[in-house]
Amino acid sequence: MDRTAQLTARVTGRGIAYDRPSTAPSATSLHVRAARVLAANWTGTSTVPSRYLYPHQWSWDSAFIAIGLRHLSPLRAQTELETLLAAQWGDGRVPHIVFSPSVPLDAYFPSPDFWRSSTAGRAAGAPRTVQTSGIVQPPVHALAAWLVHRADPGLSRARGFLARVYPRLAAWHRYLLRRRDLGGGGLVSVVHPWEQGMDNSPCWDGPLARVTPAPACSFRRADLVHGAPEDRPTDLDYGRYVRLAADYRDGEYAEGDGEFAVEDPAFNALLIASEHALARIAAELGSPGTARHARAERLTAALVERLWDDASGMFLCRDLRGGMIRERSVSGLVPLLLPGLPREPAGALVGTLRGPHFAARTGLVPSYDLRGPAFESNRYWRGPAWFNTAWLVERGLRAHGEKAAAGALRTAFLRAAGDSGFAEYVDPDTGEACGAPGFGWTAALTLDLLHDMDGAMETGEEGGDRG
């Protein structure tokens, strides 16, 4: 899509005031349809990923949703992030779910009575006024906050948005860097597959094999009420997820003693991108961001040292108990997002994207190796193409000067999002919709790609800001 297809709009605190659009009708229609999804999923203070399958607020979903909402209403985008951060724990962690008290307990599992955050999480400073989960999700939030600020700096400054969220974001990063460096090499570890966000990836099969699953009779899978069983994790895998979560809860959410600890490239790449964003937020607030940029550079070096694999041409996960995980997943491509990534791994990642393991017929990026032994085109994170990871890879291609490849991915994204009804994910070869329809981040990131035609992430070195 070229510049002539860009929506022309004046973004205000209350929403969008349109000038005469210089856009094709299809792009206008896509914008309107995406906005309707976000309106339907809006609760008044946050946006649910899906009214039926995911009826609460999810952490990294809200960050991606805020990035898209900034084009509709910067005020609503700010509120999205503020609502999430209001549920932050005293130790700095941002929980992966903030539960709505108006939703019945049986609408989603694990429910608040499973996590017992206000009691089991008391020592870690869990809030008493809201129920949350006890695990986390990838730290996209500082990046989202910076992009939301840039959408309407005047409104942001008038509301003191950055001044209020910066201490919480800094505490969040401090928790990850101090409490989750379980391997001692500088990178953050996840202690549950749900934390990494790509819940059912084949990357977790090896580490999960050590985990004794919870008995099937001990939990009820609400996800199967609204999701097709062939698209969802198996009962065996789900039993292992439940066991890990229950053990973590019973240990009062303390770090370091669980069966699962993995250094993941996407999780750490998003932390690095958000460290750069925090540096920019600090500078906006009148403090030097040099130390944060330097920390991001050190984390980038650690990422390359510990997780880069020359033979695969991409980053791999590291199981702290079992060593490198040889499975190829989209997580290993996400570090392309980092403008500071050295030239050789960046070039190799571009080559891997174009090669047989990830070159899907739709032009999207599969979540797992197309030639991998565990590939399934429609099962949750075991092959389908997701829109949030496509957005990250598109930004990465653009950051490294691959404008033609980025444009092709953008076009594939917008086509698949519209054709699928903003599905949660799609078959990477056919584009068939899978998972929940009207999915929050699919609609939000569609809006972002329609509006932000230059694709500037503003996560790299100083001097990359746009006016």
Image (cartoon, helix red, strand yellow):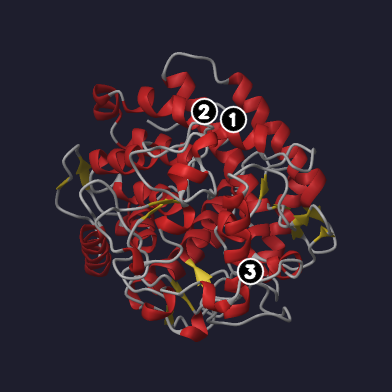
**Among the two numbered marks 1 and 3 on one chain, the one whose residue lies closer to the N terminus:** 1
Q: Residue at x 46, y 46 (%)?
A: 117
Label 3: how many Cα within 10 Å (few below 14, some 14–19, many 20+): many
Residue neighbourhood size for the residue with mark 2, other residues' Cα within 10 Å, grouped as few (<14), some (14–19), many (≥20): some
| Foreground residue among 356 and 185 | 185
Label placed on residue 240: 3
* Real-space Cα separation, disc 1 to disc 3, in angstroms: 29 Å
Instruction: Name the residue: 80% across, 47% down.
Output: 306
Tag 1 near tag 2, CB within 8 Å: yes
Residue 140 shows in this picture? no
Are discs 3 and 2 less than 8 Å apart at CB? no
- Amino acid marked by disc 2: Ala
Instruction: Give the distance between the C-alpha atoms of the residues marked 3 and 2, in whole angstroms.
Output: 32 Å
Residue drawn 42% across the image and 21% down it: 284
| In the image: residue 264, left or right of residue 82 | right
Which element is circle 2 on? helix
Q: Is residue 116 visible?
A: yes
Say which residue label 2 marks.
Answer: 170
Which of pointers 3 and 2 lies earlier in the amino acid sequence? 2
Crowdedness near tag 1: few (<14), some (14–19) or many (≥20) residues, C-alpha within 10 Å: some
The mark lying in front, picked from 1 and 3, is 3
Q: For residue 152, which quarter of the picture? A: top left
The residue where tag 1 is placed is 174
Give, as a three-letter code, the residue at label 3: Arg
In the image, 60: left or right of 11?
right
Q: Could you tell me residue 447's position as x and y percent? A: 32, 56
